Image (cartoon, rainbow, N blue to C red):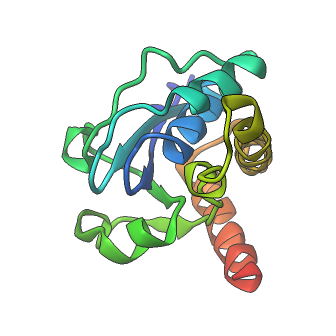
Amino acid sequence: MRSPEPQLRIAFLCTGNSCRSQMAEGWARALRGSWIDAWSAGTRPQGLNRLAVRAMQEAGVDISMHSSKRMEDVPEPIDLVVTVCDAARESCPVAVGLPSIHARFDDPPHLARGARTDDEAMPHYRRVRDEIRAFVESMPSDGSRAVMMEWAGRARTVVERRS
């Protein structure tokens, strides 16, 4: 009888590790936690965004205990790095040499900067939360490292066509 493969470690990376990468980690743990060991990190961690926490809570995923981390805080080995913002894609030397894909998502705090209230800001957070969920749902629901790398190759092609 074959022993099960270890969980794949995926690091979602953005600049502040406050919003998008935290949402991605939350969704990956909630939707693919049986075979993905999800982490998030930032090139310049800024602390957890309270409206990201609120948006995820509305969807039934609690990220309130997450904390902002640097890439160095993610345990190795890392099987795949997913950059979720352009700045992280351009400025992350840690990801060099690691399998990686870029899945760009809008920055909710930037989109909501003109909002006068949290309620005015929340539609931006909800939209990006739902886009990140759809991205995570596109990941294989089970399988091996080979299955994930095959998916990553296809995802990379689709993302590059979108950019």
Residue 43 point in image, percent of width and height: 29, 56
Quadrant position of residue 74: top left
Q: Nearer the viewer, residue 119 or 41?
A: 119
Task: Name the quarter where the C terminus is drawn.
Answer: bottom right
Q: Residue shown at 73%/45% (left/top)?
A: 140
Task: Name the quarter where the N terminus is drawn.
Answer: top right
In this view, 101 is above or below 90: above
Residue 36 point in image, percent of width and height: 54, 34
Residue 28 point in image, percent of width and height: 61, 34
- Total count of labels: 0
Q: Is residue 127 left or right of residue 90?
A: right
Residue 62 point in image, percent of width and height: 60, 15
In this view, 81 is above or below 4: below
Q: Residue shown at 48%/33% (left/top)?
A: 49
Q: Nearer the viewer, residue 104 or 113?
A: 113
Query: Furthest-front residue in view?
Result: 116
Q: Residue shown at 70%/74% (left/top)?
A: 159
Query: Furthest-left residue in view?
Result: 72
Q: Nearer the viewer, residue 110 or 27?
A: 110
Q: Residue shown at 74%/15% (left/top)?
A: 60
Q: Nearer the viewer, residue 137 or 116?
A: 116
In this view, 67 is above or below 93: above
